[in-house]
Amino acid sequence: MTHPEPLLPEFLKLYPFQPATAYWRAVEIEHVLAYPFPGGKGLDLGCGDSKLTRLICDRVGRRDWVGLDMDPYEADMARQSGLYHSVHVATAAAVPEPDQSFDFVFSNSVLEHVSDIDGALREVSRLLKPQGVALFTVPGDQFKECLKGPLLPGVDRERYLEEFDRRVAHLRYWSAEDWRRELVRHGMVIERVTRYLTREQVQRWELLSRMTGGLLYGLLGSVKRPIEIQKAMGVRQQKLSLPAPLRELLSGAIAFQVPARNLPVSEEQPCGCLMILARKSGAAN
């Protein structure tokens, strides 16, 4: 059952200067919350500033968390949140934790950015207890099909997509079958694959991204990615918050005619993202 609370105003509160991110996360996390969330001790793989994970915990209850992020800046913000027992600055392929330390690993929109994906999946398997679960969200193989693409006539779509990948740092768009094959190689079996972000929602996010981070990226010569620009501008450490009435008004404008809700996506329709739950093989202790 879908969580009844609209999340876009909440994400606009967390990320007032990132409407595109707020829109994507509102759809994504409502989808995550529509299913039982793993319990026990968890690794937040790519924890970022921890705001998203705290929002989840506010709805599913606290978990025994360890955080990991390769960005010292983000990891420091996660430490300051008080949500985690510890936060490591490390890559997903080299996690400084003992074998079989975790009941679950959670990774939200991270694995598409990881260069050593084979090493990362090997680490996830090593860190999980037998019968532990990996829950992660990623853009799927239909994501680029859902993008509207260049707005100006005569602009090559392939060139647009290549520049898009550089800006958002996406390294892969695997299908469910791709993930199934790679996870099996590392002793994990997929138990559930669900689809979210309709074509219309992907294109709404794309429009918001063009108008914000994409615009800054272009103005600054397509050198620094939006997250690097935000850091340089001091936006990510800002603790300003939009007043609730303004958040509601902005939410309505952002989601006009294309709601930021977890809409059903039929198998015949293309969708942007996949949520995958995989279980490690072996007898539970």
Image (cartoon, rainbow, N blue to C red):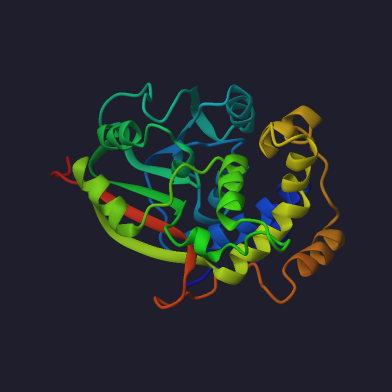
- Residue 5's place in the image compared with 66, above or below, is below
Name the residue nearer the viewer: 145 or 12: 145
Is 229 left or right of 117, judged from the image as shown?
Answer: right
Task: Residue lying at the far left in this picture: please name it.
Answer: 283
Residue 75, how many percent across, how many down? Answer: 58, 27
Is 198 left or right of 12, judged from the image as shown?
Answer: left
Residue 105, how many percent across, how many down? Answer: 38, 42
* Number of numbered discs visible in the structure rendering: 0
Is 116 left or right of 236, judged from the image as shown?
Answer: left
Which residue is depicted at the point 62% across and 24% down?
76
Which residue is depicted at the point 52% across and 58% down?
144
Position of the C terminus, as image quadrant, is top left
Residue 169, how many percent across, how many down? Answer: 55, 40
Specify whether residue 114 is in view: yes
- Residue 96's place in the image compared with 42, above or below, is above
- Residue 144's place in the image compared with 166, above or below, is below
Write down the quadrant of residue 185 in the picture: top left
Task: Residue lying at the far front in this picture: please name it.
Answer: 154
Which residue is depicted at the point 32% across and 31% down?
119
Residue 112, how many percent across, how many down? Answer: 46, 44
Is 219 left or right of 120, judged from the image as shown?
Answer: right
Specify whether residue 33 is in view: no
Name the residue nearer the viewer: 116 or 156: 156
Which residue is depicted at the point 82% across and 46% down?
241
Name the residue nearer the viewer: 168 or 255: 168
